[in-house]
Amino acid sequence: MASELFEPSPAKAMSSPDDRLRALFAQAPGFTAILNGPEHRFEFTNAAYDRLVGGRARLGQTVAENLPEVVEQGFIDLLDGVFVTGEPFIGTSTPVRLVKQPGRDPELSYVDFIYSATRDDEGKITGVFVQGYDVTERVEGEQRRKLLADEMNHRVKNLLATVQSLAMLTGKSAKSVAEFRATLSGRIEAIAKTQNLLISGSTQKLSVAEVINNELAPYLGTEDCIRLSCEDLFVEGDAVVSLGLLVHELLTNAAKHGVLSDVGGELEVRCERRADGAVLVWREALSVPISAPAPQTGFGSLLIERLARDLGGGARLDLRPEGLEAVVIFDLSKPQ
């Protein structure tokens, strides 16, 4: 390391104030460098500075020679300004791209630093003293927290818009206050359950099987009529909420009119990958076939179609005499 060239020998150890000062700088947790002359030649660097620049600082050579990537980033211009004017420059959370390993691309770091002029006994500027700290972890932590806050704000706005829409549309289709209250409560609970699933996860990405299982949970174990098979598929972001609410609508219909009602029967839920994305197949087989299927104009059907579009695909609902078959296509390539 460059700093080793300035460590005092045993014979001269701590022999002068300069030696003691350099020894302190060499051990300092913050990075330190002394640059000489208008060309900014390295006279001293400590271990922290060497770590910052990948050990490339060579004593007697210039910053531009050893760290060419910082030239276009404006740091040589800053050093020139301090050397000419004598005015210090302070940088806070300043981004800098530095080559940490030979042959590799520059890596982004963030530094708090100060450039201050050094002077001789007559007050003439002789160089620039560099001192600072690598604050990359702190800055990246702040960026992550801001990203999470922005994501939470976005999600809350979406949830409020969804609840408002559900309230208005449910009110139009409900035939009584009791029906309105029960239907809206169930839909909001479905959103809340899926949100809890998303928040409790370690990432913003969840498996499709996990989302479906979360909705079917009240029936799994108590009903032997449900068969679920799902390939290893994942959704993220708002798509998690849309998929959870879509499955809830299918489940609500099955509990009121289909295989999970008094009619009975079997339910097959299957999801698999396709060339154009993924497909969810919901197929009911009623114990007692329906003699005259009702028209599919309810809000539940419209909501399923809307949620499928939100997922980047579409839905086909077929109310057959033997029960409902729903085929939902959705996009896995990006969060919706």
Image (spheres, rainbow, N blue to C red):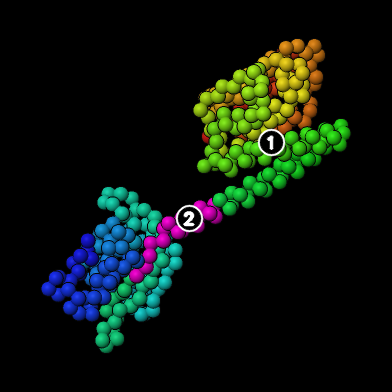
- Residue 163 placement (x, y as % from top left): 73, 42
Residue 80 visible to an observer of this rendering = yes
**Residue positioned most to the front:** 222
Residue closest to the eye, 150 or 18: 18
Mark 2 residue element: helix
Which labelled disc corresponds to residue 141? 2
Query: Can you give x and y, in whole percent of width and height, for residue 321 in the image?
Result: 75, 13
Residue shown at 67% from the left, 48% from the top: 157
Q: Which residue is mark 1?
A: 190
Q: Position of residue 238 (x, y in %)?
A: 61, 40
Pick the front one: 265 or 294: 265
Q: In which quadrant will I find the N terminus?
A: bottom left
Q: Secondary structure at mark 1?
A: helix
User: Quick one: label 1, few (<14), some, or many (20+) residues within 10 Å?
Assistant: many
Locate residue 244: give its quadrant: top right
279 sits left or right of 38 in the view: right
Magenta: main secondary structure equals helix
Above or below residue 95? Residue 23 is below
Vertical placement of residue 255 versus 1, above or below: above
Q: Residue at x 79, y 16 (%)?
A: 293
Residue 172 visible? The answer is no
Sort mark 2 into few (<14), some (14-19) or many (20+) by Cα contacts within 10 Å: few
Q: Amino acid at mark 1?
A: Ala
Magenta segment? 131-147
Residues tagged 1 and 2 counted as in contact (Cβ below 8 A): no
Quarter containing the C terminus = top right
Q: CA distance from mark 1 to mark 2?
A: 33 Å
Residue 143 is a magenta residue: yes
